[in-house]
Amino acid sequence: MATDTKSVIPDLKPEQLLGSKRKVTRADLAELVKIAREFDAQFVRTAAFGAGDDPDDWCGTMWHRGPHIGKLVDGLVSRNWIIDIFPYGIPVIDGVLINLSNQARAGVR
């Protein structure tokens, strides 16, 4: 059965995509630190891009060991952080690296 792509994929203009970028605020970063402390996660590295106190783009990597990986991930996703996870440990996961940012990379939907 054929699918009508016009009903599935809207016609977007570049201006619409640029307008949907989410800037990170100091409040967002304070909440991120709070989540990291709550689940005993450690920041491995961070980077901010843009001028001023509220950068346009922010990204970082967290290291987490512990039983609450799912709750940490849920907390990040519910606050609109874009994440990807790399598990360490074979056959049992000992910990995870979580890359996070406020913007999706090119090609990510």
Image (spheres, rainbow, N blue to C red):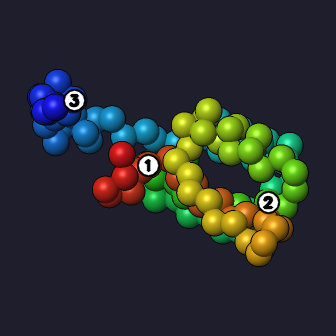
**Disc 3/disc 1 C-alpha distance (Å):** 23 Å
Nearest to the eye among marks 3 and 1: give it. 3
Left or right, 6 with respect to 51, comes to left
Q: Check disc 3 and report the residue beneath it.
A: 8
Total number of numbered discs in the rendering:
3
Q: Secondary structure at mark 2?
A: strand
Question: Residue beneath label 1, please?
Answer: 103
Quick one: 24 or 10, which is closer to the camera?
10
The relative height of residue 27 versus residue 106 in the rendered view (above or below) is: above
Which residue is denoted by mark 2 in the rendering?
64
Q: Secondary structure at mark 3?
A: helix
Could you say which quadrant of the image residue 5 lies in? top left
| Whether residue 60 is visible | no
Q: Which label belongs to residue 91?
A: none
Mark 1, other Cα within 10 Å: few <14 / some 14–19 / many ≥20:
many
x and y percentages locating residue 17 in the rendered image:
25, 39
The image shows residue 64 at horizontal and vertical percentages of: 79, 60
- Which residue reaches farthest top? 7
Q: Residues at badges 3 and 2 in contact (C-beta under 8 Å)?
A: no
Compared across the picture, whether 79 is left or right of 92 comes to left
Q: Identify which amino acid the numbered label 2 is placed on.
A: His
Q: Earlier in the sequence, mark 1 or mark 2?
A: 2
Does the CB distance between marks 1 and 2 fall below 8 Å? Answer: no
Q: Nearer the viewer, residue 102 or 74?
A: 74
Please give the name of the residue rendered at 79% of the width and 66% of the height, measured from the top-left corner. Answer: 93
Type of residue at label 3?
Val
Q: Give the mark, 3 or 2, whose residue is nearer the N terminus.
A: 3
Q: Which percent across, then down, holds residue 50?
A: 43, 55
Q: Quadrant of residue 98 in the image?
A: bottom right
Please give the name of the residue rendered at 77% of the width and 40% of the height, measured from the top-left corner: 71
Does residue 32 sit above or below 7 in this rendering? Answer: below
Residue drawn where x is 61% and y is 34% of the image:
79
